[in-house]
Image (cartoon, rainbow, N blue to C red):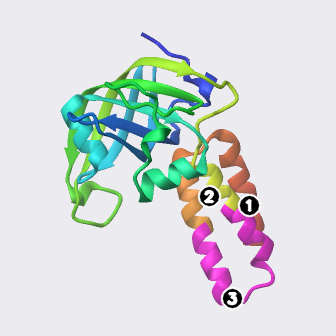
Amino acid sequence: MSFDLEKIGINTEERYECIYTTIDENGIKNSAAIGLKYFGKDNIGCRIFEGSKTLENIQKSKRYVVNITQDPLIFTKSTIDKLPSEYYTDDEDIAILKDAGSYIIVNVVDIKEQKPENTPIDNDQSIFLIKGKIESVTINDENIKAYNRGLSGLIECLVNFSRYLIVDDEKRAVYMERVIENERMIGRIGDIQTKEAMKIIKKEYEKN
């Protein structure tokens, strides 16, 4: 089966920040902010570090929901706190955000462990690569699109550039380091427009 995720702002090979919701065997719902990658048709994937409640629930149930939202409180509470029960729908067998602009129900087809030496972050935790098949896509608000993290990096570079010429050399070096890191990140996950904008910003930094 094939799904048109462009309707909710998702293109293949780019990465998006979404809220993943899961439910455990006791009916307790959980949420977490996790990246999403779409491979086309009904193929979707993500990476989750070990120790996560989301990972534990996915390993047991082989099912999860990707919620598309741009609500900053949901992202914050899902990352540093427990999202209160009133944020979820009343469904007892699945966890879905009540106010999600859209959501994708995913069935897991493969979970593969990647050892710490092969992960992008220097720590002792393994990361699990999870591949899934889309079961269904529900669109509640066609104006809400998935958030691409590349845009955040671009805006950071623009804010820093507005200060770049009036700070000392030490601070400039810090800003340039952030430009290089954001350029790397945008090159990996950003859309075409964000990548083109990053090239323009990089040239302006290098002029000064």
Magenta segment, principal secondary structure?
A: helix
- Position in image of residue 180 (x %, y %): 58, 66
Q: Is residue 173 magenta?
A: yes
The three-letter amino acid code for the residue at tag 1 is Ile
The three-letter amino acid code for the residue at tag 3 is Asp
Q: Is residue 43 left or right of residue 124?
A: right
- Position in image of residue 149 (x %, y %): 57, 49
Identify the mark nearer the N-term, 1 or 3.
3
Q: Secondary structure at mark 2?
A: helix
Q: Which residue bears the numbered disc 2?
A: 153
Q: Is residue 73 above or below residue 136?
A: below
Q: Which residues are magenta?
A: 156-178
Q: Is residue 1 magenta?
A: no
Instruction: Give the number of the disc on residue 188.
Output: none
Please say whether residue 208 is visible from this viewpoint: no
The residues bearing labels 2 and 3 have C-alpha atoms spaced at a distance of 22 Å
**Residue in front for this viewpoint, 4 or 93:** 93
Q: Quadrant of residue 158?
A: bottom right
Q: Which residue bears the numbered disc 1?
A: 201
Please give the name of the residue rendered at 42% of the width and 41% of the height, measured from the top-left corner: 85
Identify the mark nearer the N-term, 2 or 1.
2
**Residue in front for this viewpoint, 142 or 114:** 142
Q: Which residue bears the numbered disc 3?
A: 169
The three-letter amino acid code for the residue at tag 2 is Gly
**Residue in front for this viewpoint, 173 or 41:** 41
**Residue in front for this viewpoint, 3 or 178:** 3
- Looking at the rendered image, the quarter that the C terminus falls into is bottom right
